[in-house]
Image (tube, rainbow, N blue to C red):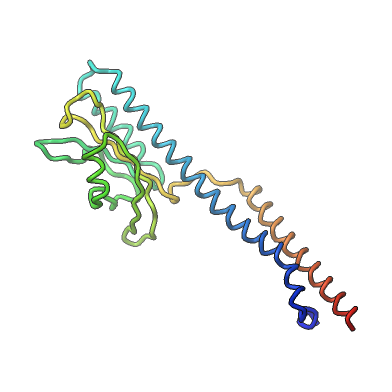
């Protein structure tokens, strides 16, 4: 019966609002993820910038004290869920890591990417996105932020702090009741719209007869 009611192609135009609702629902879901990633990224950037500002104001502090603070803060970042954090320092002319790695993304190394190497040698700070696939994992885009500190010291005496987040770093999500209510509302709207379209189509078919 329903198939017969939908013989008129104009009836399908009534389905457009339902398609729009579904598309908007998918776009909103993706937009929410993007917002949460940016929020996490800004949080990490602000933390690193605050640390750098603190170091810049303490020009008389011993370098060992600086290093202790940097290592503690960066290892704290790296302990967070799927957050990359590492600090580097020159030793005998070679830039080497000085922090322990705890993150699940331990296999990631920014020095595997030319875009990162070029940036740290030309800028005092910078942002970039690096996509990679860890062994046994799935593709993710790591939003990287790096910064040299403190800038009042010679280049070979500075510390390089690097941190990165991806969509896997998101731990704060939309409350379950709100998410469930949203999708239930979408489902009910689609069902009612479909029912209405079928009713109208069948009425038109009855009139034509």
Q: Closer to the camera, 3 or 133?
A: 3
Residue lying at 18% horizontally and 41% vertically, measured from the top left: 96
Residue lying at 84% horizontally and 76% vertically, measured from the top left: 202
Q: Height in image: 158 above or below 126?
A: above
Q: Is residue 167 left or right of residue 101?
A: right
Residue lying at 28% horizontally and 40% vertically, measured from the top left: 86
Q: Closer to the camera, 34 or 51?
A: 34
The residue furthest top is 60
- Looking at the picture, how far across and down is residue 28, in whole percent? 59, 52
Q: Height in image: 189 above or below 157?
A: below
Quadrant of the image containing the C terminus:
bottom right
Q: Closer to the camera, 156 or 62?
A: 156
- Looking at the picture, how far across and down is residue 13, in whole percent? 73, 69
Count how many numbered circles sit on residues in the image: 0
- Looking at the picture, how far across and down is residue 172, in whole percent? 52, 43
Q: Is residue 112 left or right of residue 15?
A: left
Q: Closer to the camera, 120 or 100?
A: 120
- Looking at the picture, how far across and down is residue 181, in whole percent? 69, 52
* Quarter assignment of residue 44: top left
Residue lying at 32% horizontally and 27% vertically, measured from the top left: 52
The residue furthest front is 10
Quadrant of the image containing the N terminus:
bottom right
Q: Height in image: 194 above or below 141?
A: below
């Amino acid at each position: 019966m329903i198939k017969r009611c939908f013989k008129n192609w104009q009836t399908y135009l009534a389905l457009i609002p339902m398609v729009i609702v579904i598309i908007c629902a998918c776009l909103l879901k993706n937009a929410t993820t993007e917002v949460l990633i940016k929020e996490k990224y800004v949080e990490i950037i602000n933390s690193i910038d605050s640390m750098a500002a603190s170091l810049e104001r303490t020009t008389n502090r011993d370098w060992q004290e600086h290093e202790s603070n940097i290592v503690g803060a960066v290892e704290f970042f790296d302990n967070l869920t799927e957050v990359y954090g590492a600090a580097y320092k020159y030793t005998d002319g070679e830039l080497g890591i000085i922090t322990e790695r705890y993150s699940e993304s331990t296999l990631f190394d920014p020095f595997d990417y030319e875009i990162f190497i070029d940036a740290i040698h030309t800028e005092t700070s910078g942002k970039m996105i690096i996509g990679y696939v860890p062994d046994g994992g799935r593709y993710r885009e790591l939003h990287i932020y790096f910064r040299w500190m403190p800038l009042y010291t010679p280049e070979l005496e500075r510390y390089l702090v690097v941190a990165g987040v991806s969509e896997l770093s998101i731990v704060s999500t939309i409350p379950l009741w709100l998410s469930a209510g949203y999708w239930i509302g979408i489902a009910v709207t689609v069902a009612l719209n479909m029912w209405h379209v079928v009713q109208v189509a069948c009425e038109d078919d009855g009139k034509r007869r």
